[in-house]
Amino acid sequence: MADEVHIPERRMVLIGDRWSGKSSSGNTILKTESFECGRTRTAQFEMRHEKVEGRNLVVVDAPGWKPSRSLREIPEGEKQRFKLNVCKCLPGPHAFLLVIPIDSAFSIDQRKTVEEHMKLLGERAWRYCMVLFTCGDVLEKNTIEQHIESEGPSLKWLIEKCNDRYHVLNNKDKSNSSQVTQLIKKIDEMVEYHNDGFYELDECTLLTIEKKQEEVVKKAVERRRRAEEHRKQMEVVTAEISLRKLQIVLLGSRFVGKTSVGNTILGIKEHERGRTTQSLVQQGSVGWTKITIVDTPGWWKSFAACDTPEVIKDEVKQSIFMCPPGPHVFLLVIDAESSFNGKHLDAATSHVELLGEGVWNHTMVVFTRGDWLGERTIEEYIEGEGKALQSLVDRCGNRYHVLDNNNEDDGTQVNQLLENITVTIAGNQGRQFIPDNQMLMALTKKTRQVEEAAKLRQSQVKATRAVGKGSTYKLKELRIMILGQKLAGKTSVANYLLGSTVFPTHPNEECNVQTVQVADREVTVVDTMGWHCESFRCCEKQDQELVRGLTLSPKGVHAVLIVIPLDLKFKEAEQDALEDHVKLFGDIVWNHTIVLFTNPDILADISLEEYIEREHRALQWLLDKCGNKYHTLNTTKKAGVSQVTQLFEKIDEMSAKNRGHIFHPDKKEINRRIEEKFQKKKLINSLEDSMKEVCRSRELQLLEKYKKRLHDLHKDISDIPSFPKQLSISKKDKDKKKNVLSSIAEEMEELDITIKRLRNSSMSFLQPTMSTSAPNSDNVLEWLEWKVNQMTINHSRTSDYGSSSTLNDSF
């Protein structure tokens, strides 16, 4: 027994992406089938321990993370649980085994996900981290070092962060005990290096998380109690409702599982259907209830309705007229495995409210992927995510339901959902949501106008192209430059045109060029860095790099392609950003420019011209500038060779119209424009700084004046003489005087803090850039007068105090 006490213990936590092989690796290390593998994922931490190779091994299998480029994308509960995983093998783990499968590329996005999750543990956690490669059988005769070198900078960065600590497991060959022996030896070396030390979560962080979780559980119980109480109150009404017919409209952002919810309700096993691009009706029966479900296109989760293309918004509006006289309930679908913040709330509310007044009375939240909650209740998820999600659920009258996607055959959860829907209907006394006919009339009128305008644009395009028809002009050598906003999909377009992944798919900060033989042409493509929509994020270095792209094709280019994604709205801000950059090339650039629309699947059965005519005038301005030269490209369509062929034909026609002239502007002239642009910007910034200082001084004066008035008032009230003894003064009046004095004192303390902050601040609370609604900045005096007025208005709106005259009147 004495020997048993001295057996060394090695504690490790398996972390990594979902489906990376963590559980299988745990079984390989422990030489048992302790963790469940296969289609069942790890929804909550699991700890196992075994005696292996003369060591007491403690292995914690942590839930896998989903891709996220920032901490804001990680659910609050998941962040807390990830931190607490390290406490599941007290006093703390000797090693974090970061599981990376060899059979898939380690991209820059995966690097970002790892980096963001490791931030939760702190920089010192890297000292205890080792990369554990799985799928070792894929290497075959290659070494792991060769794999690391071939993968690129992202994986090399990870290996360096882990101080060159890595190991390979072949989980298919569990009989190979040497791979476990070598792993334990490497962990022993880590332990020795750290002088038997281990990673330990500081007690303050631990107590803070535990306190938060206790509060969440308490609030979750209260929310559930209120929901159940409401259901009981509705029991009498629901008993009187006979749901022979039920009409449902599904709402939600993209990829949350709206269609799956509809299929689950109707018992449909279809899983191959693509993204919903238009409102569709499906019918079926559950028991004796005939159900009609309208599935609507989803919006981007972080973008409000003002950023959603009109075609999507019109389809959402149209949905309420597809189940006359109107839907009984709207099911707002939310993904329970993802974060939900203020941007997501704005997106959800702005899209739902497109449907008209009173829509929230008929709306219920349905959470999908409830299987990812693990042991947590849906109420704990709601309370743990924060005010944004709580606000949304409250707006729906605390009506919600959760579906387990792993149990689609479980009829009880559909029955429970229908019961909750019945409660929602009961709250409206059985009444359906009746849409406003004015909305239908407006949609019908808009469609008619759009169709007419689209036909006109189509005829203009045909007339323009007819001039070049019949020409045998064909460029044997084709040089193309691609421009666009960041994340518009420029690199995907470049790779698609060249027929292979020749450009790196991560966001690029510099211009690149590649030449590939495509059919019988030599095609050169210059992929440029994208620009930011916000003008204040643009710097001279970025503009110079953008223009440097032209030097990568010394002979010039035949075509400039401006990439515009159809699933995001092109508005004034996008127009201003585009014009700000493209004008550097001079007006001649428009003769060589074609607008290339991506993500055309959003069009469904409408024409591109109808989409254009529905959209903001900024998009129509762009097409007019290009002389109606545009094309669509679906970069996800593998067999779409004809798309590229047609685009090249349009470039041939454009080149013929330009009489063979290529776009080859004077570099000195472009550099002169860049210099002028940023000289003007510096002047405007200088003027803004001066105005900010004026406003800051004025605000300090007002605050000091306000503070003095409060001080005098405090003194006047304090100096009021005592009343004669024969007059009885109630305790209530004495307390009232005391409370007034206390309130004034507190207000003066807050003013001291504000005054101190203003004296030390750089006026960051004021906008650093000109508003898009400002007058033309070329007229500096006109802009300066406008800016003074705006600051005065903003100052009066944002101040937390009233004017001195108002204070006197109130006293």
Image (tube, rainbow, N blue to C red):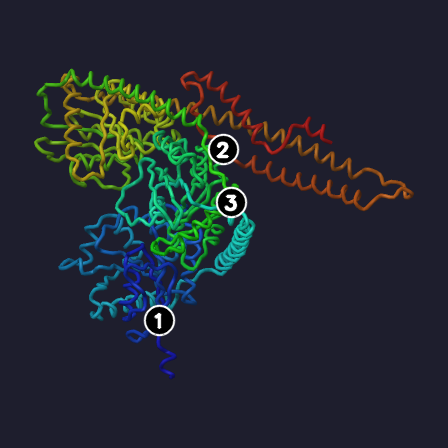
The percent coordinates of residue 714 (x first, y second) are 74, 37
Position above or below: 512 against 557 = below
Q: Mark 3 points at which residue?
A: 426
Q: What residue type is labelled 1?
A: His
Q: Which of marks 2 and 3 is nearer the N terminus?
A: 2
| Coordinates of residue 349 in the picture (x, y in percent) | 46, 37
Q: Which of marks 2 and 3 is in front?
A: 3
**Frontmost residue, 359 versus 373:** 359
The answer to whether 29 is drawn above or below residue 710 in the figure is below
**Secondary structure at numbered mark 3:** helix
Q: Which x, y percent locates residue 26?
A: 30, 65
Looking at the image, is mark 1 or mark 2 nearer the viewer? Answer: 2
Which residue is label 1 attached to? 49
Badge 2 amino acid: Glu
| Quarter that holds the N terminus | bottom left
Q: What element carries label 1?
A: strand
The image's mark for residue 357 is: 2
Quarter location, residue 331: top left
> Does dot 2 land on a helix, a strand or a loop?
loop
At 56% from the left edge and 31% from the top edge, which residue is drawn?
798
For label 2, count other residues whose C-alpha is less than 10 Å away and answer few (under 14), some (14-19) or many (20+): few
In the image, 90: left or right of 581? right
Q: Nearer the viewer, residue 439 or 512?
A: 439
How far separated are the C-alphas under marks 1 and 2? 58 Å
Q: Distance between the residues labelled 3 and 1?
A: 53 Å
CB under 8 Å between discs 1 and 2: no
Location of residue 601 (image quadrant): top left
